[in-house]
Image (tube, rainbow, N blue to C red):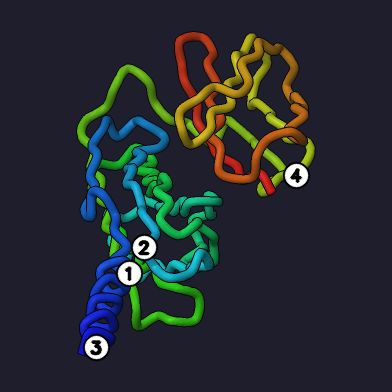
Amino acid sequence: MKKIFTLIGLLICLNSYSQSVFVPASAYNSHFCSEFDITVHSKFTNKFVTNKLEFIRIQKTVTSNWTTAYCDCELCHDINTDTGKFSVAIGQTCETSAHFYPDGAKGIGYIKIKVFPEGDPANFVIGEYSASCWGVSATFIENQKLAVSPNPANTVLNIGFGAGGEYTISIINTEGKVIVNEKVENLVNTLDISNFNSGLYSVKIESAGKVFYSKFIKL
């Protein structure tokens, strides 16, 4: 009888331990529509019985012209990636985020992410991310005058402008940290990004009181 109760207790512990969680389970952020990237953060704690996990973007609802990308615990994916594999130690908590790109248009965005042990989609947890934007700020987006290539990029990034002048180039990671900040005058400028971590980056260009934005993926 004692062994039976011990086994029952063990099963209860394993069941409660398997309840992985997003905090918050439904995350939200709002900003000016002129912002290039509206980022929504949520922490994920792995309480599955394995460190090898998968995610699937099971729902995406965004205003026309909006796009969105997801960052799991290891990698920021491009806007067309709806599934992927990643690793998190059992019991570890990590940062995840959804990135909404409004392209200057008022609206809303929503995605739902399903995370489960690799090969076991029936055992899962759900994370939700939503964003909205309003009005315009003092800056504006005018991407047609800014060329960023190649994209994705590996070792170098070329940034070209539609006209000559003085420009300030800033490269910003998903945590909002400025990795590069340089003043340039050339129509085309080449940056060494070989030491960058893989993931999604924002390119911010300032010139004559105007601000231009783009993005690229580092392989």
Which residue is at the front of the view, 187 or 83? Answer: 83
Q: Are marks 3 and 1 in contact (CB under 8 Å)?
A: no
Q: Assign the N terminus to one quadrant of the image.
A: bottom left
* Residue matched to label 1: 18
Q: Secondary structure at mark 3?
A: helix
Compared with 41, 163 (above or below) is: above
Q: Nearer the viewer, mark 3 or mark 4?
A: 3
- Mark 4, Cα crowd under 10 Å, few <14 / some 14-19 / many 20+, is some
Which residue is at the front of the view, 27 or 47? Answer: 47
Q: CA distance from mark 2 to mark 1?
A: 5 Å
Q: Are marks 2 and 1 in contact (CB under 8 Å)?
A: yes
Compared with 119, 134 (above or below) is: above
Disc marking residue 198: none
* Residue matched to label 3: 4
- Mark 3, Cα crowd under 10 Å, few <14 / some 14-19 / many 20+, is few
* Residue 195 percent location from the top left of the image: 74, 33
Which residue is at the front of the view, 182 or 42? Answer: 42
Q: Residue at x 23, y 55 (%)?
A: 25
- Lower position in the chain sequence, tag 4 or tag 2: 2
